[in-house]
């Protein structure tokens, strides 16, 4: 009994097939891990997958940063926007919402410029390669069968028919091998395209983290104007990081807060001087403030007003004057000018 002869693929084609298989394997793995990074919640990922399969728009939902931001803002309004703590809560909430917006932009950019091209390769190019590869396998089996029949043929007529069948099978196999080879050689172009997509992903990450850093620096500057009662417990750590060349903690010069390392009960030298003299000083408004009553003065960010202190006043307030208007103003919204 004759064993079926197996037609071997040439080494170049075998290498191309292995390269394509490895590309498909790692493309799928990178996609899955990136999806986990962009959306850690598996239930939400499944929901988004189903919406995509149904060709329906995914419903807009607030992310965790935005939810935290809304919570902080609501808390700030409840505590009182005119108080240092209430104002800080609102400012932190607004920054959290900015972080949430930046995260959404990063996810969208990553999905369009990174995940979509990868998914297109798996669902498009690689499916075509798999289809042609399967056809090649079938043509190889046909060729092997034709070779076996030729070996078994004894009569001249049977050999002639077997030889004719073998020539046809060989021709079809060679043609399919060439089609498959051309498709497989396109994997190099796929790698080049995926490299560009990877660069886009890195750019999106760099933009996202730069935005987040800037938002936090701006928030630190705003919180830097708060009185010493609200100085962060991390001041010593921040100072150590700054000395070591890491990210410094920005503090607005001349603001009404205690210097780093001072006791929580102390006030800034500028404010101490103002209260001791009881004389007027000019101050820049750091951000808008809406007066809560007729005894207070509404403020607009970046305007310059005159402030003074009166004996027995609450430590969180000063008297502000703007032309013919006069009223109490929260010190956390001001920066004394020299």
Image (tube, rainbow, N blue to C red):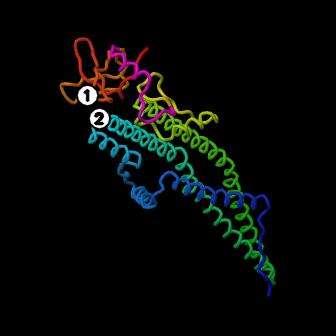
Left or right: 249 with respect to 189? left
Q: Position of residue 304 (x, y in %)?
A: 35, 16
Q: Residue at x 37, y 54 (%)?
A: 56
Report the front residue among 306 and 150: 306
Q: Earlier in the sequence, mark 1 or mark 2?
A: 2
Q: Position of residue 179 (x, y in %)?
A: 68, 57
As for residue 125 lying within the magenta part, the answer is no
| Residue 181, picture quadrant | bottom right
Q: Position of residue 315 (x, y in %)?
A: 32, 29
Left or right: 311 with respect to 231? left
Residue 105 is tagged as none
Query: Marks 2 and 1: in contact by CB < 8 Å?
Result: yes
Left or right: 19 with respect to 227? right
Secondary structure of the residue carrying tag 2 is loop
Crowd tier of the residue under label 1, counting other residues whose Cα lies within 10 Å: few below 14, some 14–19, many 20 or above = few
Q: Position of residue 11 (x, y in %)?
A: 80, 61
Is residue 168 placed above or below 287 in the rendered structure?
below
Distance of label 1 from label 2 (alpha carbons)? 9 Å
| Residue tagged 1 | 290
Report the front residue among 192 and 81: 81
Please report the bounds of the magenta region as a residue range. Answer: 260-280
| Residue 254, picture quadrant | top left
Left or right: 238 with respect to 229? right
Query: The C terminus is located in which quarter?
Result: top left
Is residue 199 placed above or below 17 in the rendered structure?
above
Is residue 171 placed above or below 306 in the rendered structure?
below
Kindly give the residue lying farthest to the bottom in the view shown. 1
Crowd tier of the residue under label 2, counting other residues whose Cα lies within 10 Å: few below 14, some 14–19, many 20 or above = many
Secondary structure of the residue carrying tag 1 is loop
Q: Residue at x 51, y 30 (%)?
A: 250
| Residue tagged 2 | 81
């Amino acid at each position: 009994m004759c064993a079926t002869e197996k037609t071997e693929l040439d080494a170049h084609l075998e290498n191309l097939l292995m390269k394509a298989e490895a590309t498909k394997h790692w493309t799928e793995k990178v996609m899955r891990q990136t999806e986990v990074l962009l959306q850690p919640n598996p239930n939400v990922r499944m929901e988004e997958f189903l919406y995509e399969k149904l060709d329906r728009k995914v419903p807009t939902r607030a992310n965790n940063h935005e939810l935290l931001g809304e919570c902080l803002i609501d808390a700030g309004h409840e505590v009182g926007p005119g108080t240092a703590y209430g104002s800080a809560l609102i400012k932190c909430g607004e920054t959290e919402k900015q972080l949430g917006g930046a995260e959404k932009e990063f996810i969208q950019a990553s999905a369009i410029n990174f995940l979509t091209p990868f998914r297109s390769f798996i669902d498009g190019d690689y499916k075509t390669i798999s289809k042609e590869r399967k056809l090649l396998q079938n043509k190889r089996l046909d060729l092997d069968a034709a070779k076996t029949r030729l070996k078994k043929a004894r009569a001249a007529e049977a050999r002639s028919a077997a030889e004719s069948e073998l020539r046809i099978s060989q021709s079809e196999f060679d043609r399919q091998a060439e089609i498959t080879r051309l498709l497989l050689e396109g994997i190099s172009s796929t790698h080049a395209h995926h490299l560009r997509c990877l660069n886009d992903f890195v750019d999106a990450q760099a933009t996202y983290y730069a935005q987040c850093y800037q938002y936090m620096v701006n928030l630190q500057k705003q919180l830097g104007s708060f009185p010493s009662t609200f100085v962060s417990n991390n001041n010593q750590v921040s100072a150590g990081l700054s000395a070591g060349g890491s990210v410094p903690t920005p503090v607005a010069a001349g603001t009404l807060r205690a210097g780093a390392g001072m006791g929580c009960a102390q006030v800034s030298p500028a404010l101490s001087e103002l209260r001791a003299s009881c004389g007027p000083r000019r101050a820049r408004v750091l951000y808008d403030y809406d007066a809560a009553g007729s005894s207070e003065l509404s403020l607009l960010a970046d305007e310059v007003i005159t402030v003074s202190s009166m004996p027995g006043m609450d430590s969180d307030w000063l008297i502000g004057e703007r032309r013919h208007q006069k009223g109490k103003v929260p010190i956390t919204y001001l920066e004394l000018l020299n």
